[in-house]
Image (cartoon, rainbow, N blue to C red):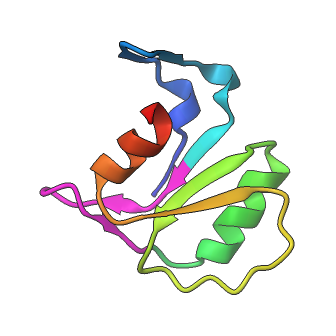
Amino acid sequence: MFQNLSGLKLRYRCGEISERSGFCFAGEVGLSGEIRPVNRIEQRIQEAEKLGFTTIFVSKHNKISLKNTGIKIVLVAKIEDVVSELFG
């Protein structure tokens, strides 16, 4: 699953995340909020970078050997980690 979070408008007391945010997500969200790894993660990261995203959230359980990418890779374990990164 390759889910683009930038298409969502999330309201929070600190503001909104809009289409201009540059965030995307590659992973599977379990019922308890855990972020599961996905196949071909390096290919997904490279594609997200080509599409112009600046930050990608991926499971901390994915093995990533990419170096010198122009996209910030944020490793997360739970959906709460994504929310924390987005809203501080």
Residue 28 colored magenta? yes
> Which of 87 and 48 lies nearest the eye of the viewer?
87
**Residue 10 image point, x, y percent:** 41, 20
Q: Is residue 4 left or right of residue 80?
A: right
**Residue 48 image point, x, y percent:** 72, 53
Which of the 4 image quadrants contains residue 73? Answer: bottom right
Q: Which residue corresponds to the image point at 58% horizontal and 45% vertical from the top-left?
A: 24
**For the view shown, which residue lies furthest in the left direction?**
32
Q: Is residue 80 left or right of residue 47?
A: left
> Which of 3 and 11 lies nearest the eye of the viewer?
11
If the image is split into quadrants, where does the C terminus sit? top left
**Residue 42 image point, x, y percent:** 67, 75
**For the view shown, which residue lies furthest in the front direction?**
88
Q: Which residues are magenta?
A: 25-37
Q: Which residue corresponds to the image point at 81% horizontal and 42% vertical from the top-left?
A: 52
**Residue 1 image point, x, y percent:** 45, 58
Residue 43 colored magenta? no
